Amino acid sequence: MKNTLKTSVYLLLVFLLTSCIGDKKTVIGMETGTDDFTNKDFKGNVYSFTELPDDLCQYLNTNDILKAYENDGVNEVKIDPTKRFMGKNCDFTLLYNDPSKYSRGMISVVQDQGEDESLWEEKWEGRKKIYKSASYVFGLGKAAIWIEKQRKLEIKMDGYTIYFTTPATYDKSFDYKTTAVNSIKNAQFFK
């Protein structure tokens, strides 16, 4: 009985600390029903999910990524197509002038399976609201969310979602959001 009480108190403390310190927040009691985050100018996908290859590295412009990070001491963007996870993605590494430094980024595409396409707006509105550091990015796909704490850009397309994780940098004033948006725009997923 004592162990159950201790475990319950411990779990309650962990939950409270995680919700206070972490990036997530509750969506209970928040109003939903706005669509002002949707891209009214979305003209459709350039590629359907089935047309996209498993290796998405061909869509990344490594010169643009290198240019964005050059002031931080990055001298190479290395793409190794053999280092892939399952699914459609590309893992890339920033190599610095200092050989002990490196940073990783990733682009992946996940099919929206079993999802009613007519309900996507409600899901995306809720997704944005659960992250304290989340903000909408306008003009990409059907809708886009930037999650600052994760350095991740999520873009809703017809039938799939694009995820772009920006590599971390040693420069504290680095603009991750602009780098992610420019990298995705240059990847030519949009009409």
Image (cartoon, rainbow, N blue to C red):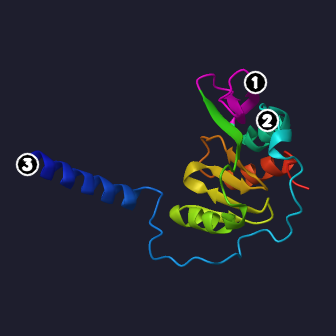
Is there a contact, CB below 8 Å, between mark 1 and mark 2? Answer: no
- Examine the structure image and report whether residue 98 is included in the region drawn in magenta: yes
Q: Which residue is labeled 2 in the image?
A: 56
Q: Residue at x 69, y 34 (%)?
A: 87
Q: Mark 3 or 2 closer to N-term?
A: 3
Q: Quadrant of residue 20?
A: bottom left
**Depth check: 7 or 112 in front?**
112
Q: Quadrant of residue 79?
A: top right
Q: Which residue is labeled 3 in the image?
A: 2
User: In the image, which residues are magenta?
Assistant: 73-100
Q: Mark 1 or 3 closer to N-term?
A: 3
Q: Is residue 154 visible?
A: yes
Name the kind of residue labelled 2 in the image: Leu
Q: Which residue is labeled 1 in the image?
A: 81
- The Cα–Cα distance between marks 1 and 3, rounded to whole angstroms, is 53 Å
Locate the C terminus and report the quarter of the image it occupies. Answer: bottom right
Position of residue 10 in the picture relative to residue 110 (left or right): left
The secondary structure type at the circle numbered 3 is helix
- Residue 13 is situated, as x and y percent measured from the top left of the image, at 25, 56
Mark 3 or mark 2, whichever is nearer to me:
3
**Depth check: 188 or 121 in front?**
121
- The Cα–Cα distance between marks 3 and 2, rounded to whole angstroms, is 53 Å
Q: Residue at x 62, y 45 (%)?
A: 171
Within 10 Å of disc 2 (Cα), the crowding (few <14, some 14-19, many 20+) is many
Q: Is residue 175 visible?
A: no
- Examine the structure image and report whether residue 77 is included in the region drawn in magenta: yes
